[in-house]
Amino acid sequence: MKLATFNINGIKARIEALPRWLDAARPDVVALQEIKSVDEAFPRALFEDLGWRVETHGQKGFNGVAILSRLPLEDVTRGLPGDDEDPQARWIEATVIGEKGALRLAGLYLPNGNPVEFGADGRPLATGKYGYKLNWMARMQARAAALLATEEPVVLAGDYNIIPQDEDAARPEAWAQDALALPESRAAFRRIVNLGFTDAFRARVPGPGHYSFWDYQAGAWEKNNGIRIDHLLLGPQAADRLRDCGIDRAARGEDKPSDHVPVWIDLDL
DNA sequence: ATGGTTGCGTAGCAA
């Protein structure tokens, strides 16, 4: 089973590039982030006519996640547990029925968290957007632990808005005070990983120079000034089945690209 | 370097 995560930065803007990538890359399941659309406005029929099951969890203007699948989906749930008042659409789950077995997939769009407010001691404050990010990550940790406890294959796929280590940025010094790379952000990410997850990409490819996002601004793509923030975390039963993982970096150089590129895994499932 | 670029939605925010 080939499973990918792709922050498309708006379904309307990617109405040509996304089907083109799906046709070329031939994934079985895709977690999409930043659909920037309400469910009713998502071009469901276009993808259904191409053979995809479509499950969306959208909102007006911002955020929004979805799952496209050629394989059967069961028990779809929307929203990250832990705060019924949270209006932001950033989490969707489904059970994917593979040929050799099922897995539980969570598609996620973790809050960016900028701008960060700093206290007089120079440490970041857990207020505003950064506070929301850290709170959201604590909720995600609880949900991730619950999913692990099922002892079924689990994949947490999405835009984490986390640069896990300095080697995951072309210019780490430019991100040192940013919500994507602050020590508190990285520690919250590690607390989730350390529950027992494997970063699929790092299980396959060591070393610097591998990115999944290049800003539209200041020629970041042309300078290869990128960061690796789109991740697939595998529970142990999914990690056992990992055959390969890659980043489709070429997608960033095509017509009207997203600022993110797809990251994919091949699982023996 | 306080710019730069894109998307949504049609102003200004988010990234």
Image: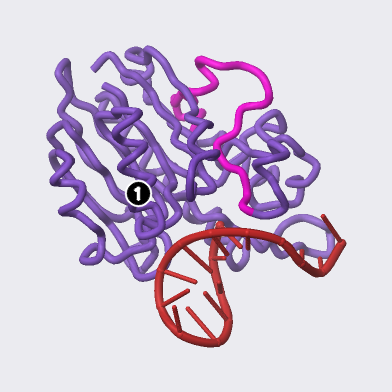
Name the chain letter of the residue that bears numbered label 1.
A
Looking at the rendered structure, the secondary structure element under dot 1 is loop
Q: Position of residue A154 (x, y in %)?
A: 31, 29
| Chain whose colour in the figure is red | B
Mark 1 neighbour density, 10 Å: few (under 14) some (14–19) many (20 or more): few
Residue visible at 16% across and 15% down in the picture: A100
Split into 4 quadrants, where in the image is the C terminus of chain A?
top left
The segment highlighted magenta reads: A193-216
Split into 4 quadrants, where in the image is the N terminus of chain A?
top left
Asked if residue A263 is positioned above or below residue A49 in the image, the reply reads above
Front-most of residues A208 and A162: A208
Front-most of residues A227 and A234: A227
Residue occupying the far front of the picture: A255
Report the amino acid beneath label 1: Glu
Q: How is the image coloured?
A: by chain
Q: Which residue is mark 1?
A: A16
Instruction: From the image, state the color of chain A.
Output: purple
Residue visible at 44% across and 46% down in the picture: A7
The answer to which quarter of the image holds residue A235 is top left
Q: Position of residue A88 (x, y in %)?
A: 39, 64
Residue visible at 29% across and 33% down in the picture: A23
Q: Position of residue A12 (x, y in %)?
A: 36, 60
The answer to which quarter of the image holds residue A232 is top left
The answer to which quarter of the image holds residue A189 is top right
Asked if residue A36 is positioned above or below residue A264 in the image, the reply reads below
Magenta region includes residue A199: yes
